[in-house]
Image: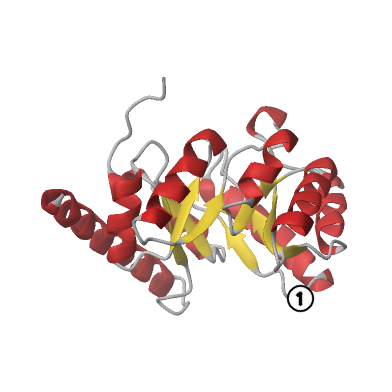
Amino acid sequence: MTDRRAELSAALQQVRGRIARACAAAGRPEDAAHLVAVTKTYPASDVVLLAGLGVTDVGENRDQEAAPKAASAAAAGATPRWHFIGQLQRNKARSVVSYADVVESVDSVRLALALARAASSLRDDPLEALVQVSIDGDPARGGAAGDDIWRVSDSIASSTSLRLGGVMAVAPTDWDPDRAFEQLKSISDRLIASHPDSKMISAGMSGDLEAAIRHGATHVRIGSSLLGMRNPLR
């Protein structure tokens, strides 16, 4: 455990350095982009260690893994802000709402309504929800495109049990990241014009965080650069 803590501490220092340098290069404050540590396939013990190192936000993309991990971490005294970042089926909404503080992957009105119903019965405070934007319109990757972006955002904003936080996207692998994140920033600007408090832009991962920060990312989702290469899911 001591070796793993040292390993994570060293990686965290490097990642935080990259974020700070990217912010400075973009002419933004060095703390303008917040780290979300993506711990999928890694144990709850890593979440506990990261929390002890000052990491406040953790991301997961599979409910069947995230729910028990959040419970185990909490039992060990670690209560980070949990972000659900994966594609989400409506029948999992109630489970996700029970532990997540932010759902970043809201890509349909039906999912927004399911989350709102679950949040109204399980939470005292609104659940933060982001509209997942499809940069290239490919439905296989999830995300809302075109006018659906505004339908989803309006559905979230009209719910008393949800809070519209902003937008999230993954840059398509066959796109230049700057092009992808420039497009996301344009969508974010339009959203903020209608919903001024919805300023969160979750964009950028280990390979493209600098491009995301250049185009206004407020949160970057970092997995492999922080925790190491993952074992394949079975």
Estimate the x, y position of residue 190 in percent, counting from the top left.
78, 65
Q: Identify whether 174 is placed above or below 211.
A: above
Amino acid type of the residue tagged 1 in the rendering = Pro
The one nearer the camera, 218 or 137, is 218
The residue furthest left is 3
At label 1, counting other C-alpha atoms closer than 10 Å, the crowd grade (few under 14, some 14-19, many 20 or more) is few
Q: Identify whether 185 is placed above or below 221.
A: below
Name which residue lies at 74% across and 65% down: 163
Name which residue lies at 72% across and 75% down: 197
Query: Which quadrant of the view contains residue 210?
Result: bottom left
Residue pointed to by mark 1: 196
Considering the image in quadrants, where does the C terminus appear? top left
Instruction: Say which element carries label 1.
Output: loop
Name which residue lies at 84% across and 45% down: 109
Estimate the x, y position of residue 164 in percent, counting from the top left.
74, 63
Q: Identify whether 211 is placed above or below 96.
A: below
Instruction: Report the side of 233 relative to 111 (left or right).
Output: left
Instruction: Report the side of 179 relative to 195 (left or right).
Output: left
Q: Identify whether 108 is placed above or below 82.
A: above
* Count of number-bearing discs: 1
Name which residue lies at 88% across and 63% down: 158
The one nearer the camera, 124 or 139, is 124
